[in-house]
Image (cartoon, rainbow, N blue to C red):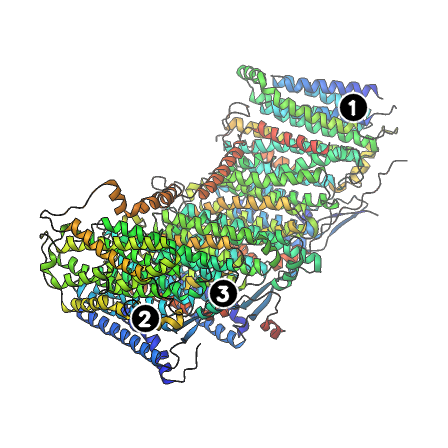
Amino acid sequence: MNIMLELYGLIAIGATALAITRTIPVHGLLYLVVSLLALACMFEELGAPFAAMLEIIVYAGAIMVLFVFVVMMINLGQPDQLREKGWFAGGAWIGPSVISLLLMGLLVYGVSHNTMAVGTVGAPIGPKAVGLTLYGPYILTVELSSFLLLAGLVSAYHIGRRIGGKS
Amino acid sequence: MMMFALPALVLIPFIGGLAAWLVGLRGASRAAWVSSLITLVLMVVLLAQITISSFAAGAGAGGWFAHFSMAWVPMLGINVRFDLDGLSLVMLWLNAVIALPCVLLSARNVADRAGLFHCLLLATVAGINGVFMATDLFLFFFFWELMLLPLFGLILIWGDAGRQRAVLKFFLFTQGSGLLMLLAILGLVIVNQQRTGVITFDYFALSQTALIAPIAPVLMLGFFIAFAVKLPMVPFHAWLPDTYAASPAAVSILLAGVLAKTGGYGLIRFVVMLFPQASAHIAPLAMTLGVVGILYCAWLAVAQDDIKRLIAYSSISHLGFILLGVFSGTRIGMEGAIAQMVAHGLSTGALFVIAGLLEERLGTRDMSKMGGLWPAMPQFSALAMFFAAASLGLPGLGNFVGEFLVLMGTWQVSHVMTFFAAAGLVLSSVYSLTMMLRVFYGPKKTESLAPLGAPSVPHIAVLGVAALLLLALGVYPQPVLNLSVPASPHVVSIAQEQAQ
Amino acid sequence: MPIPATVWGVSLVASLLPLVIFCPLAVSIILMLTGGKLPARATTLLVGAGMGLCALFAVVSAYSFLSGPNSLGSLHVVLWNWMNVGSFNAQIALTLDRLSLVMMLVVSCVGFLILVYACAYMYDDEDIARFFTYMTLFVASMLLLVLASDLLGVFIGWEGVGLCSYLLIGFWYGEQANAIAARKAFVVTRVGDALFLLGMLLMATAVGSLDIPTLLAVGPHAAPRTLTLGMFLLLGGAMAKSAQVPLQTWLPDAMAGPTPVSALIHAATMVTAGVYLLARLHGLFVMTPLAMLACAIVGFVTILLAAGSALVQTDIKRILAYSTMSQLGYMYLALGCGAWHAAMFHLVTHAFFKALLFMAAGSIILRVHHEQDIFKMGGLRKDMPWVFAAFLAGSAALAGLPLITAGYFSKELILGSAYDLSPIFWAGALFGAFLTSIYIFRCVFIVFWGTHRTHAHGKSGLAMALPMAILSVLAIGGGWMEMPDAIANVHIFSNLLAPVLGALPEEHNTSLLILGSLVPIAGVTIAWTLWRPKGEAPVAAESPAIATLRADWGFDTLYDWVFVRPFMVLGRLNRRDFIDRFYDLVAALTQGSGHAVAKLQSGQVRRYAGWIAAGTVAALCLAV
Amino acid sequence: MSFSFLPNAVLVLCLGSLVQLAAISWRRHVARDAILCVIVLVAALASIMMPTALLMNGALPLFAPDTWASFAGALIILSVLAIVLMSRHGAISADPTVNSEYFLLLTLATLGGVAMTGAVHFISFFLGLETLSLALLGLIAFQNKRLDAGEAAMKYLLLSGVASATMVFGFALIYAETGSLRFAVPDLSHAPEPIIGTMGVILVLTGMFFKLSAVPFHLWLADVLEGTSVPVAALVAVTSKIALFAAMLRYFSSVNLGVPSAQVNEILIVAILSMLGGNLMAVVQTDLRRLLAGSSIAHVGYLLVAFLSPVPFGVASAAFYLAAYAISTIGVFAIMNGVLPQGTDIREWHGLFRRKPAAALAMSVMLVSLAGIPPAVGFFAKFYIVAAGVSAHQTLLLFVLILSSTIGLFYYLRLILIMLTPAPAGREAHAEVTSPTPVNAALITVLACATILLGICPSTLVQHSQALIVASPLPVAAPTQLP
Amino acid sequence: MTAADPNGALIVAVILFSLGALGVLVRRNLLFMLMSTEIMLNAACLAFIAAGNRWHMADGQVMFMMVVAFAAAESAVGLAIILRMHAAGRSTLDADTGNRLGG
């Protein structure tokens, strides 16, 4: 048992729960960042320090900042927040909650019936090992992922073009 | 020469249809008509040639006497295989005989896009020819579905009010049931493959498996339903009245004259001959439904106002006899069913010619608006009377031969059913004479309608020839009865042996 | 037994026999093909020639047959093989034996006379060609019916005469009622035809052939139950054709046709086809006492019912129609008693006198402006004495006035055999004879005596008079060829038929004969007291009971309510076919579920995601 | 010694997209970029036929060098080629400043698709899939001034995000169970194994069904097809489905689908729901593209029938069906694009046989093919699938197939019917009928001819399909533990 | 180094995944929905890391990186679309209203 892992997990869950229930996007984003940081800590505990760093840098750093930018650019006003509150009222939660709970229950049931052995004690898999794997057996993956990013890039570029221009 | 005659029977109308279309593109509807007619004449000549050489090869004694085979999809054991037996030959003749007036009479009716009309009509004819000859089950199914497609266009473009609904209904019924048959065909093929290790769609090769397969009843049912829908059998008949009523005259003739017979042909060739035991099991049900159809549709026919619907329902009623005969399990019933197919093709086709002419002249099909037409067109009315008499099964005309033999075959199986079927004879007189009464007799009611003219010479000629044929079939049916004995799938084709 | 056609006489008959049928058929076809373009004179000449030839050939072949070496047996002429499927074989073949010979002569000769009469009767009708097309076709069919050696061949004629009857009843189709009457006649007889067909099927299955000689030879060995059922079915067919209760309703309506039609078809020939059929099959019939009893009962009931109806009719043709039914009843009674000779004899004499009566009635109708109500006629005795004479002769024969009429002898023969079966039948039949004389003389007295109520014009021409004259002679003297021993030992007719029908049974009690002779006289007397000219014009008695009686004892109404109306009304209700509606329902259901499925696409992405999640959850449930 | 194999086509497409990128960055020129795209695609097609060029020692096997991959890859490339041809001069390239990327994105989408067809590893599958998705996103929203396009892209993005996440989660569960990222469905024959592997497969299936748009994961398809331009709709409806189906077939190639298990049951149910749901949905649609969405969903259902009947015809019939489906569906879209680009409402198609007989005829041929009526290729395809189903004794599926095909007939035929009949009075069509460009016309002609010819002489394609081998991923090695 | 429990981490991942799903289902704000999909992807990442930990292999982390790459690209595109729609005239981020496609 690793108490720290549990603790980080709880933090992540709590922060995520808060994140998805905020009415103000920025608040939600901040909770999400907290959750991501907790996750990074979990990665560290799980013996993946490189992943933990990437999580902080790419996720908490880059992607979340992107979100914040967009929030700023769209600059939603007060009416939107009031309306968000309205959307939470009533039965809007029932259906989704039932589905999510079922999903969670089923998956938890599956995971807890797992015969998975307790993780082996061993040295954490550091950046070097990851790098060797990445540029060894998975070399083609790296190349392909660049085209994935290229596709995303071109798409995002094209879609976002001429935002300020006349349409 | 015989070798390629069979595929040529399919190709000639098809190519002729394309030619008619191309000719018609120039805008001359007459030219399309002529080329279509020439095609059919060619087909008839070829058919005559085939018949002559068939007799040389021993036709009339049963068995198969012409054969053609060519690989199509060898990976799946699909061949283009045609075989000819007496039944096929008779049905091919029926097709040719019915198709000719369809083309002949459409000279004037169809001015709009005549080339396309003839193209589609001939394509249908080609498909029907294929159905009557194919002995590769895939090929058979191919033609089975193919012959419907041109009809879609024919009915939709040149049809009457309500055609859209009717044509969709027609297609859904026939195609849906066709898919069931596809299932059955494939089931048979797969069972055969498991038994022998060979994938083949060959009728003859599969007939062995069809005999012994444990799921033969299920497979048979697939075939049966498809053919029962096409025939049609009650309760699958709902498409027919709408379709017949909405079709242009030539198509009604073709539909009633030949297309329904493909169902009967299929029942004989692919249900009774292929699954003798299994079809014997279902025979009581099929016969009961046949009797129900005879009575129920005769009853409905009496109640109709639309003359085409009346003929359509009467047609279903008559086709019940085919069902009875085919499933009576007796040779005599089977022969009767075949005779009935031929006779019904001629008589109902002729009735549709009459209905078509009436509609053309009067602008209505509603019998409550007709009446007293006899003085205006006496010869025509007399011919109508003739066909009404044929339809009610007057002895001496073809229909009687069919009905009598069917009843005789049925009598040997079930007296009760025969009683009810014979009651159908009474009802058939009711609707036939009611039609005469409402259309031709009584005081003249047609002042408000378009003026009548004398029927055209082709009309009278066509009806006259049909009458003669019916009469010939009625008083001397023996050639047809002798020739039309369906050959067993277990008999190897003479021609095929020769080819090997 | 068929013998090789080596003898000259036999070969002559064999070649003439088809011609007997062919002559009227050829006339019919010629008239059909010319399509009414021939002038009336040419038409009548053609018909006269054709029918004359037909009658001539019939007489010649009858003579050669009777004088030939095989006059006791039968002559078989096979024309061609009709159907030959498996073990079943049907031929188009003709048989001449003494029974069919008699029928052939009746049909061709009486037919010839009636057609000659009709030539004059219909001369002014513009559709005369069509009329004679049907008429000659009828004669051909009737001859085929009579001569065919195969039951199936008989059936061709059977249905052929039915069709011609239909066409001729509806000859004046401009009147809707005529066409409806025609349809009714055909449909009702068609019921019988279906029964006949079933009977044939049964016979064919039991015996293996429908060839009549074979049937008669092999049939009696069939299982009695099968035989009984088969004979019942055939009896049903015959009854419908002969308008016997309960299938009699068509005959009065059939009077809508031209009068020669009524004379030929609905009096002399077609309606007697049933009698002929049963007589032909008497070898089988005699094996089934139950069927015979039924036949007798049917005849008995019909005699009385029809006579009762005839008593109150006002239409002259309807009187004759009911009288025909009643007389046919006598024949059926005779058949039921096994008195084949009597039935056939009455058939012949009835053909004479009833054809005569119809012709006379037709002459009257023609000359009083197509008036048929006897109460609107009167005093015609003076205007048309020859017609009166003919009608009187016919009436006397019908009433069976003793000794001097043909009807007397044939009826006495029947009454005698009815007594053998049961005195009740005899008494009823006697009462029927009593009624017969009353109603026919009622008609005579009303029409020919009393004051003029209508003006008669014109004269009946020679073409009409001659046939009537000939038939009058036959109606009076035709009976002398068969007389009871008590009167004179003349048995020409029964001797003629004896090789086919067997010997005549022994003589009957003379007291019955005397009683039977007195009854018609009593009837005429009563009719005279009731309807003799009384100064004022006679009127038809009216009361609900009489109205019912006049309307055929309510049979028509009953059938209308029990069969016709439910059939038609329910048919109209179901005109659009409830099975079709069921498919419409299926289509609507499909459409509806389509809309339901399409509604899932609300456009809200959350819901879409919800479905994805729900689907996943459901799938995960499968795994648990 | 393991070696990795990079399919030629992937390589060519990678290089090609770089070339296109470079060309765009040098100078924008629409015609040149289009031609470049065509050249790249043709080169990729040619490269499929050639022996593998790139083998890497020591790398993980990510792709399988089998005929199935080649077939599906070729099909994808051909379909994209058709889409390129039809989109030239279409509404989408009306704005000259934006359309160069269009062709680049098409190339990238092709790359993703082709990569998926050969993938035998989660990573390569995932990358291919997401490359395709991202490129598609760009294409869907390509007309970025249209709100519809944006909405469609947004929906696609969100839902595909959910689906991808689900699928990745499934990968993770499988990985947790087996320790391998190779394509190998956990062998569940020795129950009661931990169900986590099964759950992983089910989550993966969710992702796959989403992309295939099988019921109940189908809801996005109609909206996306409606929102985007016609050629892109064709791409969504055809190319991405071919790619995904190819990958799915390979993924399950190691599983005996005849043995009931949770995932087989799920596929079965989904197949039934798809066939019925798709057809029922299409019956009531009045928008042609939504109708085609329904049709597409139904066809996925039919494909799943073949999928569930692998022995002995399943793969071959699926291949044939994919080809038939691709030809006919692209044909329909090409005709839409060429003749009635604005006429998405089916009522606009009234009387097309009068206005544009040739196009209407071609359209009818395509619809007949989709409906599965001879002599069009769709008939043989359906026949083949039914043959597969029959030989695998999939009775239930087959009955549903027949039922739903019959429903399907209704709307295909109704469309032909509409084209044959003039518009009812007062409801005349508003949309302008345009003449297709020569390229598009040629494309339509080729497709129509192919539909008929392949329907009449299917033996060549059958021969190819029968020869297809889906290489099973290498046998799963026992999870190796680090010492 | 204490032994980490991959099962526990997996359960956390499951819970996060479900929360993400809940977010997508319940929120109408496009931005939050996008965030929720990121949460789901993150949960998958965690699962991968946990599984990698179980097998003690680097594959998990490699996959993690690919997923992160995808997540980045996806959110970039997604945000671009949001901006685009906003610019094109859809004033709110409400996903339920203003839909033109559907039915």
Residue C414 appears in view: yes
Callouts 3 and 1 close, C-beta under 8 Å: no
Please give the label number shown on residue C220: 3
What is the three-letter code of the residue carrying label 3?
A: Pro
Rate crowding at label 2 as few (under 14), some (14 to 19) or many (20 or more) other CA atoms within 10 Å. Answer: some
**Which SS class for mark 2?**
helix
- Name above or below for residue D280 compared with residue E98: below
Residue found at x 75% / y 45%: D254
Disc 2 or disc 1, which is closer to the eye? 2
* Residue B117 appears left or right of A143: left
What is the three-letter code of the residue carrying label 1?
A: Met
- Name above or below for residue B100 compared with residue A70: below
Rate crowding at label 1 as few (under 14), some (14 to 19) or many (20 or more) other CA atoms within 10 Å. Answer: many
Q: Position of residue B312 (x, y in %)?
A: 40, 52
Please give the label number shown on residue B297: none
Disc 3 or disc 1, which is closer to the eye? 3
| Residue C157 lies in quadrant | bottom left
- Name above or below for residue D135 compared with residue B6: above
Q: What is the chain identity of the residue bearing mark 3? A: C
| Labels 3 and 2: the sequence-earlier one | 3
Residue D236 appears in view: no
